[in-house]
Image: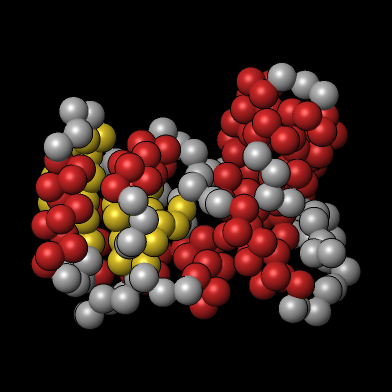
Amino acid sequence: MIKVLIADDQAMVRQGFGALLGSQPDIVVVGDAADGAAAVSQARDLAPDVVLMDIRMPVMDGLEATRRIGAGPKVLILTTFDLDDYVYEALRAGASGFLLKDAPAADLINAVRVVAAGEALLAPSVTRRLIAEFATRPQQNRPRPAALNALTPRETDVLRLIARGRSNQEIADDLVVAEQTVKSHIGRILAKLNLRDRAQAVVFAYETGLVVPG
C-alpha cells in the first residue's frame, strides 16, 4: 500500500483528494495537514510514502516544508499557479515532481504511483523551465566536482541527457541501448551521487556545470 499525506490549506481540496485516492486499492490516505508546519510534523509521525504538498499555505509554505521533511517521503508539489517562480527552488528543496490541482483525476492517481515508485514526475515543460532558469545565470568556470569522477563515461552521458529533458526511451534511442539498460544506469547514477531521484539529478547536472544551457 502507498501511504499518502495531503497538505493543503483548503479543506475541500484535502477532502476531495482524500476521497479520490482512498478509493484506490493500492493507496491509503494516512493523514492531512492544513499548513506546512503540520505537514512536517505529520510526515515525521506517520511516515508516508508520498506527501501531496501545496505551495502556498499559512504558518509555513510548501517549499520550506519540503526542505524540512528531507529524505524519506517523496514530495509531489500541487499548485494552481504558474510554475516559473517555484520549479527551481522546489526541486532544490527535494520535490520529486509537480502537478496542477486541476489535472484530471487519473493524472493525480498516476502521479502518486509514479513518485512512490521512486521515479520523478518531471515533465518536459518543467525541465525546460529549469533550463531557462540556469540560462539566465552568468556561467562560471567551475572545477569538476569530485563526485562526478565516480561515474563511468556512459553514466556521465546518461546524466547529461537526463538534464536535457530526455525520457528513458529517448536516451535509449540516442545511445542505441535497451530502455532497461538506461534505467540501470540511472539507478547507479543516483546511488553514486547520493541523489534522491531524477529531478535532483537534473539540478545537480546544471549546478555543477556538467551541462550548460544552450
Residue at image position (65%, 34%) is 168
Residue at point 76% right, 72% down? 135
- Left or right relative to 150: residue 44: left
| Residue 182 image-quadrant placement | top right
- Count the marks: how many? 0
Quarter location, residue 203:
bottom right
Closer to the camera in the image, 132 or 95: 132
Can you see residue 183? Answer: yes
Snapshot quadrant of residue 144: bottom right
The quadrant of the picture occupied by the N terminus is top left
Q: x and y percent of residue 77 in the render?
A: 38, 60
Q: Is residue 50 left or right of residue 208?
A: left
Q: Residue 92 location, x and y as percent?
A: 53, 63
Residue at the extreme front:
104
Q: Residue at left 74%, top 51%? A: 164
Quadrant where the C terminus is found in the figure: bottom right
Side of 105 where 149 appears, left or right: right
Picture coordinates of residue 145, whole percent (x, y):
77, 54
Relative to 148, is 155 above or below? above
Regarding residue 37, the answer to whether it shows in the image is no
